[in-house]
């Protein structure tokens, strides 16, 4: 009961990349960089296991950014001539690559870190990929001229890599779709359908993570404009409830999401965000258990997974380590409180 998992990303050690940045520069090159990525992946697997988490991830140590890590391995994209583009409905500017030709995978994308992680943990292994709609919102289109068409093209590539990750022994494949919370009508209209193309044929557990973004300043400011009740999930969850996706990861602690919206996910496993990623204050086990208690009003005990609100990538390593610990200790307390 109350398995624990992180959303996906963890801070990169200072010897691997610049710290506390969303698009950090690597500190090494070539074989040395590959070794550093492997070392950092192992370090975080150990840290998650030491904390006592039930689901382990690679912490996204081998990719610069959660979207561009995938996109770098796609043919038809100009990664050299990046352009500045407002992303997430112009919430902030990013340097994005341009789609200039038909899309095709250059080969495997995440085999190295997925196989490494699989070889070094016996626990359930979760692996994250960006969702098609979020990728489309993080690249500049100079070729397709149609968002849905381009999303479906990316979804086919994601599906190819997801099936290969499953063959590598990954237990849970999660697609990250923060864009669902920005373009809600489009998410319900075609975003969920694109997601299902990405997950087609998978027999392992499938998941989607929908959040209000990393704890960076642009996101914190955006959240201030969203009012007292964040009802974005209300427009997307009904479409997800009807989909084939098994698990949904959502924000809860310190967010203004009305918790009753979790009822819209009947039948799904719900990864409830019990750890705030926009604050360096470490949650107490009591706070984590309280959030789980709140969610239990809307989610059955056997469907609740305790999770972080989003990735921990831009945080300090010390804070992230302490938050993993708080997550595990809070879930343990919740098992004592609510487990019968
Ligand atoms: Zn997130």
Image: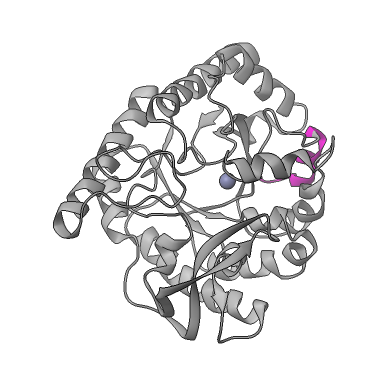
Q: Position of residue 330 (x, y in %)?
A: 55, 18
At 49% from the left edge and 35% from the top edge, which residue is drawn? Answer: 5
At 55% from the left edge and 87% from the top edge, which residue is drawn? Answer: 143
Residue 260 shown in magenta:
yes
Residue 30 shown in magenta:
no
Residue 250 shows up from this direction: no
At 52% from the left edge and 31% from the top edge, which residue is drawn? Answer: 3
> Which quadrant, please, contains the N terminus?
top right
Residue 339 versus residue 222: which sits nearer the camera?
222
Tell me the chief SS of the magenta region. Answer: helix
326 is higher (above) or lower (below) than 140? above
> Which quadrant, please, contains the C terminus?
top right
110 is higher (above) or lower (below) than 298? below
* 203 on left or right of 87: left
Residue 101 versus residue 301: which sits nearer the camera?
101
Q: Position of residue 286 (x, y in %)?
A: 61, 12
* 243 on left or right of 60: right
* Count of marks, rendered view: 0
Residue 198 shows up from this direction: yes
Q: Residue furthest left?
A: 31
Q: Position of residue 217 (x, y in %)?
A: 61, 41
At 44% from the left edge and 62% from the top edge, which residue is drawn? Answer: 68
* 75 on left or right of 234: left
Q: Which residues are magenta?
A: 259-268
Q: How is the image coloured?
A: one colour
Q: Quadrant of residue 317?
A: top left
Residue 333 versus residue 274: which sits nearer the camera?
274
Q: Quadrant of residue 138?
A: bottom right
Q: Position of residue 155 (x, y in %)?
A: 54, 72
């Amino acid at each position: 009961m109350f398995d624990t998992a992180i959303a996906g990303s963890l801070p990169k050690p200072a010897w691997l990349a610049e710290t506390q940045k969303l698009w950090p520069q690597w500190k090494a090159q070539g074989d040395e960089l590959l070794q550093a990525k492997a070392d950092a992946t192992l370090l975080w697997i150990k840290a998650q296991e030491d904390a006592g988490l039930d689901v382990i991830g690679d912490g996204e140590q081998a990719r610069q950014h959660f979207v561009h890590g995938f996109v770098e391995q796609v043919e038809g994209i100009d990664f050299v001539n990046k352009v500045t583009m407002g992303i997430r409905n112009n919430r902030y500017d990013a340097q994005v690559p341009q789609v200039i030709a038909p899309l095709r995978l250059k080969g495997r994308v995440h085999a190295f870190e997925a196989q490494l992680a699989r070889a070094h943990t016996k626990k359930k292994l979760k692996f994250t990929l960006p969702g098609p709609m979020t990728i489309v919102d993080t690249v500049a289109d100079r070729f397709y001229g149609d968002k849905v068409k381009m999303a479906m093209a990316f979804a086919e590539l994601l599906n190819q890599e997801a099936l290969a990750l499953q063959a590598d022994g990954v237990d849970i494949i999660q697609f990250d779709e923060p864009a669902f919370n920005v373009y809600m009508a489009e998410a319900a209209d075609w975003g969920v359908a694109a997601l299902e193309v990405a997950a087609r044929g998978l027999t392992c557990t499938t998941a989607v993570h929908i959040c209000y973004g990393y704890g960076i300043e642009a996101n914190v400011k955006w959240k201030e404009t969203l009012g007292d009740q964040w009802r974005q999930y209300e427009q997307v969850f009904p479409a997800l409830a009807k989909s084939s996706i098994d698990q949904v990861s959502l924000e809860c602690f310190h967010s203004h999401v009305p918790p009753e919206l979790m009822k819209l996910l009947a039948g799904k496993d719900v990864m409830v965000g019990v750890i705030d990623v926009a604050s360096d204050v470490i949650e107490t086990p009591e706070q984590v258990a309280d959030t789980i208690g709140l969610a239990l009003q809307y989610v059955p005990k056997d469907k609740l997974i305790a999770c972080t609100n989003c990735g921990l990538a831009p945080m300090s390593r010390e804070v992230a380590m302490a938050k993993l610990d708080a997550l595990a200790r809070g879930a343990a307390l919740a098992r004592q409180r609510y487990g019968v």
